[in-house]
Image (cartoon, rainbow, N blue to C red):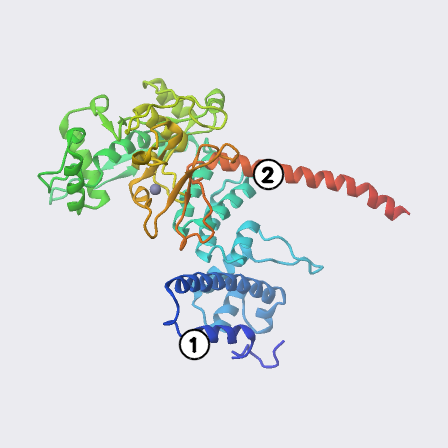
């Protein structure tokens, strides 16, 4: 313990010397690659240091330092000792509860509540913002979910955090939660039915009316594809006489692209204008034509197991989920498109060799991939285009094995120039044969590992991680059984 009453700031120590050395280092002689490399390295070190801060925080608390220094709590102790603001001190204490390593009475370390997240932070692969996102999702898991499912969820989130942005963790969490709690044990159909509402408020003197409410998953699945088509930038824009409206199918793609580049409306304004255009056109869903080559209708994906058991969730092409019971009811009233899959989840039906994908191929891709295939991208199928993995102009066939889904932004990333991404088809020996893997440019991934997008496949990941956890727990139990009699015998001897 320090001899003085408080903790003094000392300028000594190897870490301080190293950091000062880096601070004083001239940057001008560095190459561009060196600058990027150094930025990555510093980020990693800063993240590892936050893990060290958690260790010290737990250590200080276990030694009862706050009480000894006259602070009422560990949070107050941090505020006073490190001159932190209250919010910062509070979030550090909160994080340390989840990823800090406490000790038992014998001084042995105990696993933190989020061991995978803690490990990723300690290796500098994720930031405290990732941790905050993971904690927020874990807090939303219903109490009825078992410990193995809970651990699997945490493991998947930590894995996503290693390659994704903290901003996206909540969306990944939504997918996992939909599978952990498909029928909404947390929130029942009755709850949802009670909450459904669209309120159109009193018209104000200026002519405008407020609208607010909550819509159920089925209405959402019906509404999403309509908005994807008619609320896209450039469509149904009342301020632009050349913007294609309800007849968007017959519009020249260049006219639409030009209109999109002029479009300054917010997403909310585009939604409004889309509803206006739909309602004023007098046409209804069965006469709305096609969007990206498939009918404007709710496209639901479900496996045969799920249909047979009437359990689980169906995935919509626009990235939403609908409980299976509701999905089946919706399907009864529709003209179903049937996609048949083999055990690996690949469509059996193979396509022709035209440049443009057929609607059947597109539907099959939607049903298989659910969305853009670039790792980390959240764009649903309705915002994705069909992409040839081996370019068509270089002899790539329009066969289903050579087709994948990519949103427009990700599609534009594939090129041979600097910063370009590459795509490859996973071979028959890989864990996901036939799926498209993406290779990031060197500044994003120096190791050039082909990676898949698991974001639209929370269920397959969940099943895989759960199977691993089950196996591990079985092994541990088996080991325990072997170990127990030996020890008893040894004690008795
Ligand atoms: Zn994308």
- Asked if residue 242 lies left or right of residue 167, the reply is left
Q: Is residue 281 above or below residue 235?
A: above
The disc placed on residue 24 is: 1
Q: Residue at x 45, y 39 (%)?
A: 454
Q: Position of residue 172 (x, y in %)?
A: 43, 43
- Asked if residue 281 lies left or right of residue 83, the reply is left
Q: Position of residue 126 (x, y in %)?
A: 47, 55
Residue toward you, 153 or 465: 465
Residue toward you, 196 or 489: 489
- Front position among marks 1 and 2: 1
Q: Position of residue 217 (x, y in %)?
A: 36, 32
Q: Residue at x 47, y 49 (%)?
A: 134
Can residue 322 be seen? no
Mark 1 or 2, nearer chain start: 1
Residue toward you, 301 or 190: 301
Q: Position of residue 61 (x, y in %)?
A: 59, 65
Residue 284 lies in quadrant? top left
How many other residues sit within 10 Å of disc 1, few (<14), some (14-19) or many (≥20)?
A: few
Q: Secondary structure at mark 2?
A: helix
Q: Is residue 132 above or below residue 301?
A: below
Q: Residue furthest right?
A: 493
The disc placed on residue 468 is: 2
């Amino acid at each position: 313990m320090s001899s003085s009453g408080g903790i003094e700031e000392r300028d000594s120590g190897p870490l301080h010397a190293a950091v000062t050395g880096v601070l004083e280092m001239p940057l001008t002689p560095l190459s561009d690659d060196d600058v990027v490399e150094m930025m990555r390295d510093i980020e990693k070190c800063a993240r590892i240091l936050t893990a060290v801060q958690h260790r010290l925080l737990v250590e200080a608390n276990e030694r009862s330092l706050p009480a000894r220094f006259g602070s009422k709590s560990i949070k107050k102790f941090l505020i006073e000792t490190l001159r932190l603001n209250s919010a910062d001190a509070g979030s550090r204490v909160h994080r340390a509860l989840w990823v800090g390593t406490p000790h038992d009475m014998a001084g042995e370390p105990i696993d933190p509540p989020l061991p995978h997240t803690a490990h990723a932070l300690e290796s500098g692969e994720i930031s405290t913002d990732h941790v905050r996102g993971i904690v927020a999702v874990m807090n939303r898991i219903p109490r009825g979910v078992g410990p193995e499912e809970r651990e699997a969820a945490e493991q998947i989130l930590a894995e996503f955090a290693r390659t994704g942005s903290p901003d996206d963790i909540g969306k990944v969490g939504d997918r996992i939660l939909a599978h952990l709690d498909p029928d909404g044990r947390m929130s029942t159909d009755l709850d949802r039915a009670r909450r459904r509402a669209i309120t159109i408020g009193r018209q104000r003197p200026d002519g405008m009316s407020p609208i607010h409410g909550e819509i159920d998953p089925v209405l959402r699945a019906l509404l999403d594809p309509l908005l994807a088509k008619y609320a896209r930038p450039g469509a149904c824009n009342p301020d632009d006489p050349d913007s294609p409206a309800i007849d968007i199918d017959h519009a020249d793609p260049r006219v639409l692209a030009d209109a999109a580049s002029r479009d300054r409306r917010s997403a909310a304004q585009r939604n409004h204008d889309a509803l206006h255009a739909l309602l004023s056109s007098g046409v209804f869903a069965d006469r709305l034509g096609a969007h990206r080559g498939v009918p404007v209708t709710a496209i639901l994906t479900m496996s045969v197991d799920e249909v047979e058991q009437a359990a689980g969730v169906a995935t919509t092409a626009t990235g939403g989920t609908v409980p299976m019971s509701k999905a089946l009811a919706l399907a009864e009233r529709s003209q179903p498109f049937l996609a048949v899959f083999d055990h690996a989840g690949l469509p059996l039906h193979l396509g022709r060799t035209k440049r443009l994908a057929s609607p059947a191929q597109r539907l099959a891709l939607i049903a298989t991939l659910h969305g853009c295939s670039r790792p980390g991208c959240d764009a649903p199928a309705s915002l994705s285009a069909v992409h040839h993995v081996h370019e068509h102009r270089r002899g790539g066939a329009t066969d289903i094995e050579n087709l994948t889904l990519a949103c427009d932004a990700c599609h534009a990333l594939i090129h041979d120039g600097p910063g370009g991404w590459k795509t490859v088809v996973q071979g028959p020996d890989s864990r996901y044969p036939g799926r498209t893997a993406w290779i990031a440019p060197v500044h994003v991934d120096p190791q050039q590992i082909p990676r898949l997008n698991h974001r639209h496949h929370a269920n397959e990941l969940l099943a895989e991680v759960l199977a691993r956890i089950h196996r591990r727990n079985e092994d541990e139990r088996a080991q325990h059984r072997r170990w127990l009699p030996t020890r008893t015998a040894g004690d008795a001897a």
